Amino acid sequence: MSDDTQIDESAASGSRLSTRVWAWTLLVGGLIGFYASFELTIERIRTLEDPSYVPSCDLSAWATCGPAMGSWQGSLLGFPNPLVGIAAFAVVVTTAVVVLTGATVPRWYRLALLVGATVGLGFVVFAIWTSLYVLGALCPWCMVVWAVTIPIFWLHLVYCVQERDLSVGEGLRRALVQNRWVGLALLYVAVLLWVMITMGDVIVASF
């Protein structure tokens, strides 16, 4: 049996990641990420206008966005990171809308989006590391961005592998596509364990 036949059988059994599920993931994740980035931008502007302003996302000693916004890590490119998020998530949302209307985006565009999503995930990993080991605080709106960036990256990666945008072996392709939800769950578990191992005692003590 050829690899193409095996892939076709996988599609028939419903194990493929459908284009609509992929696009809806981009749309929902992009909208949530855009909103969180917008809120962070507004909070940053308010703190610049009034240094005594207490951001609405300052919920406790460990759940606060103030330290992140005031650190140099919060402006990696010389301006607030949320502005990058607004632009990036706008692209993600636009892509999703185009796909959901029935259009097909070319391979080069999907790969470019994958590069962007990978960079975005890198930003998230850096932000988590900074929050845990430098700031000792978790920014609520930032965590929303982290939560949506993970599935955007992962399911877009899976979709690119499935559509052969990336050259990988058929065994790896099938494993990634068929176990995509397990992989996504493992990513979330890894982040949760990272946070709890590093700041679990502080979080638990606050309740």
Image (tube, helix red, strand yellow):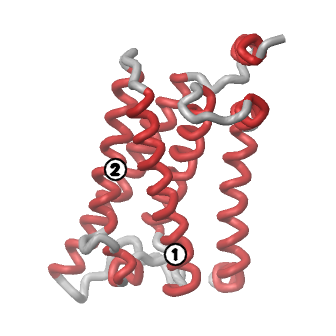
State the SS at label 1.
Answer: loop
Q: Indicate the position of residue 189 as horizontal and vertical percent values.
A: 72, 59
Q: Amino acid at mark 2?
A: Ala
Quadrant (top left/top right/bottom left/bottom right) for the C terminus: bottom right
**In the picture provided, is 12 more to the left or to the right than 32?**
right
| Position of 193 relative to 19 (above/below) | below
Q: Can you identify the residue that label 2 sits on?
A: 88
Q: Which residue is mark 1?
A: 138
Residue type indicated by callout 1: Leu
Q: Nearer the viewer, residue 109 or 185?
A: 109
Observer-side mark, 1 or 2, equals 2
For the point 31% across and 81% down, the residue is: 54
Q: Position of residue 159 (x, y in %)?
A: 57, 32
Which residue is farthest left? 49
The percent coordinates of residue 190 (x first, y second) are 71, 62
Q: Indicate the position of residue 121 as horizontal and vertical percent values.
A: 51, 57
Name, please, the residue furthest toward the right: 1
As drawn, 147 above or below 22 = below
